Amino acid sequence: MLALLLILQAATGDIVVTGKRLAEAHAACVKGECTPLRDAQATIALAESRFREGAYRDAKRLLAAAVTRNRDKAGTDPKPVAALYEAYATVALHDGDKQTYRSAVARQVRTLRDNLPASDPTVVSAATALGDMWLKLGNYRQADLVYRSVEQDALATGQDQPAMLAGMKRVWLASTMQRTSAALSKLRELEARPLARQQGFGTALRVLRLRMRARDASDEEMQELAGLVGQGQGNDPILIWAPPYAQDAAAAASDARALARRFGEEDPLRIRSTDVGAIQWADIGFWIRPEGRTAEVEVLRSSPKNSWATSLLKQISGRRYSSQEPSSSDQVQGVYKIQRFTLRSEYVVPSGSLISRRVLMGGYEILDLTAGAQAADAAAS
């Protein structure tokens, strides 16, 4: 979310300070004394601070109120309004509120499409957002349908960039679903397009092919792949391979329920009215060394009772990123990352109750908290 704030700040050069003055700036916006841009800046910054503290519902309420204040300004200020929707969707997803998440993403995309030229970079980057939403919700078929539709519409109107982006999403989705031949066929098609000769897209396609190869690579081959992907990639390493996350009890229960629904059987682990899943999160910091290995993986802070995070430390320790040549002596340690992990949950109405409540469903929502710092450096340079 902080990256969204910095993008908005770049439009005016304004910087919203944190602490007491941030609260005062937001209070002025609540009174209707701010432009949509200023309101988005102040609200996203304040919601960011609440989110980092683990107060997800407070952050969600702040963003929901800002959306209500500004949604009728979409015609004149589409980018700030879309940024509010995107931040709202991010917090809702981590809170387990999937209905709000779906609605906010859809409104974000609609705001940009309806009020900006199709060639605007913001519209281009948001073209696949609906597919990404379905992917996060585990509906791979719907995600592929969205990506396919975006690609076909973009090709029909001569918009090469969103067509390429959607095509690459389709390749990775097919690969994830173990449809290797379909993924490779689509990748070859993308590599033959004129846009593939541009450096940025050419590199992205090369990374995509190498990530597919990495799944079955030996340790020696992985070292070679890490070096190949790292060439010309700048300072931010790319994740090439990671071990699977350990399955917890909530994930096993969720899988059992899904299997029962598929075969029309009774739910073997019915959710009861007494089942309540509190928000549980952990911030994990780690170094990505120049050779692509991770080091010094640790829980920096978390909600109470964080024993579940132990398996995350093992997963991150096993990751392999692209290798990088340090650009200065300050970077010999590599790149430091902080990622927020939230235990995935969902609001459901349990049997014997009429009240929707959050229940742990297994898995994690992940947010890179250092992305905002990188965006700040870029904006300052």
Image: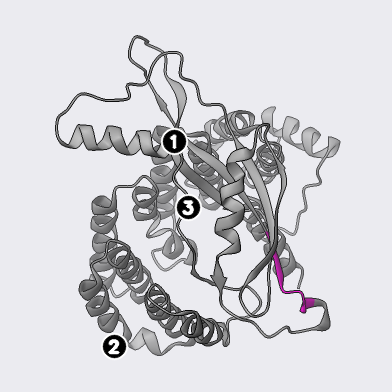
Report the residue marked by disc 2: 192
Q: CA distance from mark 2 to mark 1?
A: 46 Å
Helix or strand or loop: what does disc 2 sit on? loop
Q: Residues within 10 Å of mark 1 (few under 14, many from 20)?
A: few
Between discs 3 and 2, the one toward the N terminus:
2
Residue 59 versus residue 111 in the image, above or below: above
How many C-alpha atoms fall within 10 Å of the one at disc 2: few (<14), some, or many (≥20)? Answer: few
Looking at the picture, how far across and down is residue 219, in whole percent?
Answer: 50, 79
**336 horizontally vs 68: left or right:** right
From mark 3 to mark 2, how far is it between C-alphas?
35 Å
The type of residue carrying mark 3 is Tyr
Position above or below: 60 against 239: above
Residue nearer the viewer, 58 or 221? 221
Q: Amino acid under label 1?
A: Ala
In the orientation shown, which residue stands out farthest toward the left? Answer: 264
Q: Is residue 317 left or right of residue 198?
A: right
Q: Is residue 229 above or below residue 60?
A: below
Residue at the location (34% across, 9% down)? Answer: 352
The span picked out in magenta is 331-337
**Where the C terminus falls, by quadrant?**
bottom right
- Relative to 212, does residue 129 appear above or below in the rendering? above
Q: Which mark is residue 59?
A: none
Residue under the point 27% across and 25% down:
268
Q: Which residue is mark 1?
A: 249
Asked where in the image residue 35 lies, by quadrant, the reply is: top right
Q: Which residue is mark 3?
A: 245
Going from N to C along the chain, the mark reached first, 2 or 1, is 2
Judged by depth in the image, the label closer to the viewer, 2 or 1, is: 1
Residue 235: x percent and y percent?
A: 66, 77
Give coordinates of residue 153: x percent, y percent: 25, 65
Is 374 magenta? The answer is no
